[in-house]
Each structure stands twice: as structure tokens, then as C-alpha cells.
Image (tube, helix red, strand yellow):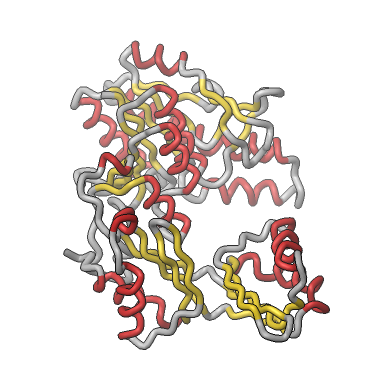
Amino acid sequence: MLKVLKFGGTSVGTLERIQNVANIIKKIKDEGHDVIAVVSAMSGETNKLLEYAANFSNNPEANEIDMLLSSGERVTSALLSIALNEQGYKATSMSGREAGIVTDNAHTKARIESIDTTNMKNALNDGKVIIVAGFQGVTEDSKRVSTLGRGGSDLTAVAIAGAIEADVCEIYTDVDGIYTTDPRIEPRAKKLDKISYDEMLELASLGAKVLQNRSVEMAKKLNVNLVSRSSFTPEVEGTLITKEENIMEKPVVSGIALDRNQVRVGMYGVIDRPGIASSIFTALADANINVDMIVQTRGLDGTTDLDFTIPRTDWEDCKKVMEKFKTETKNIDYNDTICKVSIVGVGMKSHTGVASKAFSALANENINIRIISTSEIKISMVVEEKYAELAVRALHDAYNLDK
């Protein structure tokens, strides 16, 4: 079996942890598997390198930042390879270039265009463990070093697994799998054995931090089986993220997600003319503001009310955009004391009463729902932030997710 393993910054954060990763790889190799490991920079290294750059310039060239930051992963890959070779395991480190990863020309946020697996296949045929520096490749045109942006090492691992047709891609972090909700909020949360790509995408976009959206999207596209597990408890089986049809029993609800990074924007008494909504949301899109939930209520006096949510990080930019529409609305209001709590499950497709159970669970706790949004496998509700954890526990209990 060919396994692609990915180890994040916390997993390789110290020399002792790099040795622990070497031990994990040795065990897998001893079991008879071929191994390609993708590594991140040691935790804190990327920020340190950015601080070095800021010492010389507030606006350095993006391609120079890529050259600088890519060094962090190369350091880790070389150290891990040295550790394995010292213990008698043939290992070789590879940069993104040596691993055949070619990207577009968008420095600091590049997208993978193709992977030439020739070097990796040759190394595997020689019985070697391959340690790839994650987060990087080379541009198609200039052959300059490029980096993949947030979650880039996860993306590297999934892309390599797809290109080389690995049997599985295991993402090692400091969490031993995907839980029904955050165990820090609900101690009775259970680790899931399996979850579908679509459910994982929803949970990731709704606040779950274990896996990045981009890597799950690519895994779904390339049909790569992902496993989320911990480098600190490698003996614990993780959670398999796979195709929906590979899951025999599809639970009605798989998980509860909480997102505190929300601001509700209310536009009241908006002049109800054709194209007003288009004007507002086009302006927000042009400012790269991600609008999530939208509710429109038409008034009786030729006006309309609009409520929508945005990330708190976009709040100041949103205020600037809203200035353009002051003359077309009676009042614009902001509320940052809200959160979004969501239930996710592929079983919603074939079960009735899922929404009513959620609404009843919150009503029983006297929690008022401000905005509701639904999709085929998700129901999201905006509530006051002070009720965030109570709402999560109430919903977790309503669907018996601790059973």
C-alpha cells in the first residue's frame, strides 16, 4: 500500500517532535507500506521569516517572499530525512520543484497546475521514503519558487496522493480525528469513524478547523481517501473522509459547527428598486467581502429590509462599502454579538423533521433565532453569541450525537 502522510507545524514543531514523526514513519514502513511524507515548516518558523522580511520592507516582492518562506519546509524535510537515514531507513528529501509540482504564476497564493511524479516513482522503486517540502512548487512560466497560501501543505499532500494514485492520504495534526462537535464545548462529543467529503466541506466552512476547504475539495475532485489523525496519539484510528456512497449508515446529522467570526449587517428601509440588491452585493464582492447568509423582507411602503452576515474580519471594509448606499436606506445597523451555529448531515436528504427538531431544541432553551439558512445537507442559524455554547450542546443532545 502506498500512503501519503502530511505532518503540520505542531507535529514537527521541535527536534523531539521531528523524531516522533520519524518513529511514526518507521512503523508504517515496517508494516510493509511505501511512504511519501509531506511536511510543514516548524511551528512559528513562517512568522519568524515574515518578521525578517518586514525588517527590510513593508511591501516586498511576492516572488521573494515565496523564496523566503519556502525555506521553512525545506529545513523540516531535510531534518526528517537525516533522522530516518541515521536509523537505517533510506530516505530522501525533495523540494516542491524536485517533486515535480508546477503551479500558476500567482505568487504567495498559487494553484497547482500539474505534478510530474517521475522523480517520486523512481525513489519509491529504490525503496526510499520520500520527504516532500510542502506548501510550494515552481511556476510554469518562469520556474520561480511559488507557495500555495493557507493550507498549502495539506493541498500538496492531497495533490501528490491523487497524482501518484496513493491508497490513502493521512493528515496528521494535534487532533485525533473529526468530532461531532468541539469537545471543549461539549465533552460528550464523539469522534466520527467516517464522514463524507460534502459534510466535511460544510463543517470546515462553518467553523471546524481540522482540515482546510481547499484540500477537501481537491480530495473530492481526485477521489482521494483522506484520514484525519494525530501525530501525538498515532495508535488511535482517525476519521476517514470519503465518498458518500462508501458510508453504509448515513446519520441524519453528523456534526454541529460553531462560527463566532460573524457580524450581522442590517439595511432597513432600502429603496425597493430593480437592481438594488445586485448593486449592494456586487459592491461587496468587488471589495472581496464574503457574504454568507442573506434575508430580504419587503415592506409595505415601497422599501425593503436586508439582513446579511459577513466575517468580522471584513467589518471595516464593509462599512466603507455601505457608505455608498446611505442615501438609499433609512438606517444601516451592525451587530457583532452574534454567532452562527449549524447542523450538518447527508441523512437530511432523506429524513423529515430535521429542521423542526433544531428549532424546538433552541426554543426549549429560550434561544431566539435571528436568521436561518439551509442547503441539502446543512441548516445554519444565527443566534446571540452569549448563547453559542448552550446552543451547540442543545443541538448535540437533540440529535443524540453522543450515542
Identify whether 207 is placed above or below 330. above
Q: Is residue 143 left or right of residue 190?
A: right
User: Closest to the observer: 225 or 1?
Assistant: 225
- Tell me the quarter of the image containing the C terminus: bottom left
How many numbered markers are drawn? 0
Q: Quadrant of residue 64?
A: top right
Expressed as whole percent of the image width and height from the top left, the position of residue 9 reads 44, 46
Q: Is residue 312 visible?
A: yes
Relative to 25, 43 lies left or right: right
| Front residue of this view, candidates 323 and 139 | 323
Image position of 380 (left or right of 62)? left
Residue appearing at x 72%, y 62% in the figure: 278
Residue at 75% over, 40% down: 61
Please tell me in which quadrant of the rendered image residue 283 appears: bottom right
The residue nearer to you, when weighing 367 against 37, is 367
Q: What residue is drawn where x is 34% and y is 26%?
A: 166
Residue at image x 68%, y 78%? 304
Residue 367 placement: quadrant: bottom left
Question: Residue extending furthest bottom?
Answer: 366
Does residue 233 appear to the left or right of 4 in the view shown?
A: left
Image coordinates for residue 243, horizontal then vertical, percent: 33, 40
Residue 179 seen by the camera: no
Query: Residue 40: percent from the left, percent from the top?
Result: 46, 40
**The N terminus sits in image quarter:** top left
Q: Is residue 348 above or below residue 116?
A: below
